[in-house]
Amino acid sequence: MKIAVTYNDGEVFQHFGHAEQVKLYEVEENNIISSEVISTNGSGHSAIAQFLAENSVDTLICGGIGGCAQKALAENGIRLYGGVTGNADAAVMALLSGTLEYDPNAKCSHHEHSEGSHSHCSGHCHS
């Protein structure tokens, strides 16, 4: 399993589409075997979702995230734990122990539309 956390100075970064760094964790049998902080090489939710997919990430822990970014992650088969705050390492440990507090409905406020009412994710979602 490879877990990514949007990262800034040890904390879970709160704006997915603006994350300049992620911390990647290699996990085997529920134990972290390695971790490293790397640059996302881009900005915007589509670029970061693609970056995560290219790095074989299957799970993402982040703070704020919009609906368009969630869609981009889902299209790349990446499981999302959004709405997380606090220390990045502690968040991963909580996920592995089954105690991570997250918001499965984390969305950016300007996309509170009914399902299927918007197909504009490519242009102006700022997650």
Image (spheres, grey):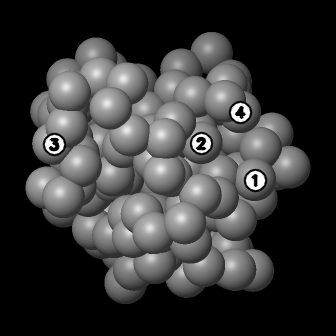
Which residue is labeled 1 in the image? 50
Dot placed on the residue nearer the N-terminal end, 3 or 4? 4
Three-letter amino acid code at disc 3? Glu
- Element marked by disc 3: loop
Where residue 72 is drawn, which disc sits there?
A: 2
Three-letter amino acid code at disc 4? Asn
Q: Residue 126: x percent and y percent?
A: 39, 70
Which residue is labeled 4 in the image? 76
Dot placed on the residue nearer the N-terminal end, 2 or 1? 1
Residue 125 vertical position relative to residue 60 in the rendered view, above or below: below
Q: Nearer the viewer, residue 22 or 51?
A: 51
Q: Residue 91: x percent and y percent?
A: 30, 45
- Residue at 39% of width from left, 80% of height from top? 8
Which residue is labeled 3 in the image? 112
The answer to whether 6 appears left or right of 115 in the picture is right
Which circle, 3 or 4, is nearer the viewer? 3
Cβ atoms at labels 3 and 4 below 8 Å apart: no
Residue 16 vertical position relative to residue 71 in the rendered view, above or below: below
Dot placed on the residue nearer the N-terminal end, 1 or 4? 1
Cβ atoms at labels 1 and 4 below 8 Å apart: yes
Dot placed on the residue nearer the N-terminal end, 1 or 3? 1
The alpha-carbon separation of the residues under discs 3 and 4 comes to 23 Å
Determine crowd level at label 1: few under 14, some 14-19, many 20+ residues with C-alpha closer than 10 A: some
